[in-house]
Amino acid sequence: MADDVAAPAPDAEMTDAPAPDGAGGEISTGGDHALNSAPNVGTGDGGAPLARAQPAASDATPPKPRVFKIGDKVSALASFDGVHHEATVVDLRRAKGAEGKDEDAIGPHDVSYYVRYAGMDKRLDAWVAGSNVDVLDPGMTRNLSDPLLGPGSLASPRKDSVNLGDGAPHTEGRKVTRNLKRRYNEINNVAGSIEDLAPIDQKLEKEHDEKTKVKNIGCVEFGRFEVDAWYFSPYPAEYADCSKLYVCEHCLKYMKHEVTLLKHKARCRMTHPPGRMIYRHPRHDEGKPGLAFWEIDGNTHKVYCQNLCLLAKLFLDHKTLYFDVDPFLFYVMTEFDERTNKHAVVGYFSKEKWSNEDYNLACILTLPPYQRKGYGSFLIAMSYEISRREGKVGTPERPLSDLGQVSYRSFWCREVLQVLHAHKGSISVKDISGVTGFQERDIASALQSLNLLKYWKGQHIISATPKIIEEHMRSFDSKRQIAVNQGWFNTQWQPPTFAPPPKPMRGGANRQ
């Protein structure tokens, strides 16, 4: 399954302790929540105080229990914006010294809650002290998880326009069908709900959520950065519930204690990833670190690739590849110092050695401290360049994560617009595929999101004037774009070829 960086997204600025945010954009907090308050007490003409308005019984806030239960809806203080938000209690734990207390003696300071904020991604889930969790005010409750049911949505009678990618402004209230919702989610990069999946996928999704619902690592120190973990990662049991994990930026070995990391650094001789450097991109003229790509065979360097996958899982929700790395190639991108020739891992993508569906990418990640630098698009561009050298038309493995969807949609749109801008006269989706190496369905998806694909006389046609194309191109930030330079590839390197895996033996229960 392909996951991004996002792209976008969630992207963190280059600071010593970056906080997670969206790849390709800021993480929405779901808007401001207005809390109900009692009206001011005034006086009448005779000086008698007016009676305070009494809230309706259904709107009254219930008293705060001593301990909330798993599944309770609460108002929790969020560390990312310092505001209370509606949340659900996912797990709870007692503080040290309160384990032996009776249930009736437990107070807010004796318990912490692991909460999931309504309408927000799991990466923002966090442990919150009991003193910062309160009863949910009825005025705060609202549907944040479904953008189709909020103001300006497809089902709303208001006149806010909603983009469906077909060129028609949708300003009338309308029934929200499953087809319409899926289309809206695809165009606007909204993750679908579990209920939209097939029954078997719903079961798998619920099992995945149950196993990974609570983060087991608080944050990770990697090189000169300390980064909050976004998701659960299946590190060995002895590293479970680790508040901070220490990872060597060169060999990716992980440790529980800082002193262990310091001892390891003193004897670690690795200055770059294992494998073969296939691309070297100097940028000293720009005053920026150089970039390099390393091709690593999961069968040859198994431990390094497993450590890379475990680290990546801290920032990817639906990554399922951890230990069975043999069938994959890993392309690791590094920043390097031209004086010391030391390399720091900034991101990677993996791909199957053999894919019947011509997938050119299985998983992709730009580490949070290095996002918002154009590295996500550069990783995607390299995956297509390798496919081009293999003589194939590639596409990423589905399903894409929310951040991966944003990154790929932006990349496809920008590249397709450049082809349309450079081409004079009519051009077909097939022609664009030949130039870019994108599969036709990905090109159609990009054109539809740009509202440049029309249905006319039984077929889809590209409808775009030079002015419209230029307007779209101005909306893309080209300052951070990094182009693949053909002259900087290792001249001795060619994409490796692998035989297809053997088919299962027929016989016994499988005899046909």
Image (cartoon, rainbow, N blue to C red):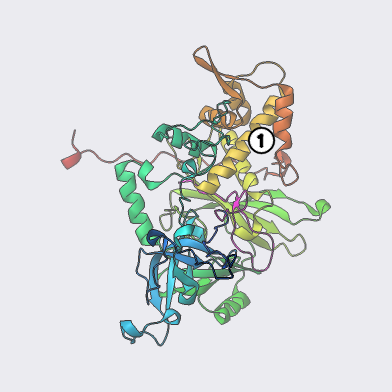
Residue at 77% x, 51% y is: 283
- How far across and how far down the image is residue 140, in percent? 48, 58
Q: Is residue 334 above or below residue 159?
A: below
Residue 110 versus residue 290: which sits nearer the camera? Answer: 110
Furthest toward the front, the residue is 46
Q: Residues within 10 Å of mark 1 (few under 14, many from 20)?
A: some
Residue 111 versus residue 258: which sits nearer the camera? Answer: 111
- Quarter holding the C terminus is top left
Residue 35 versus residue 427: which sits nearer the camera? Answer: 35
The image quarter in which residue 470 lies: top right
Instruction: Tell whether position 7 is magenta.
Output: yes
For this view, does 107 lie left or right of residue 40?
left
Q: Which element type, helix, strand or loop, lies under badge 1? A: helix
The image quarter in which residue 47 lies: bottom right
For this view, does 285 lie left or right of residue 239?
right
Can residue 331 be seen at all in this image of the molecule?
no
* Magenta stretch, overall SS: loop
Residue at the disc numbered 1: 414
Q: Is residue 299 above or below residue 486?
A: below
Region in magenta: 1-30
Q: What number of labels is visible?
A: 1
- How far across and how far down the image is residue 81, in percent? 60, 64
The image quarter in which residue 101 lies: bottom left
Residue at 68% x, 25% y is: 420
- How far across and how far down the image is residue 51, in percent? 50, 67
Residue 198 versus residue 55: which sits nearer the camera? Answer: 55
- How far across and how far down the image is residue 196, in percent? 38, 41
Mark 1: amino acid: Arg
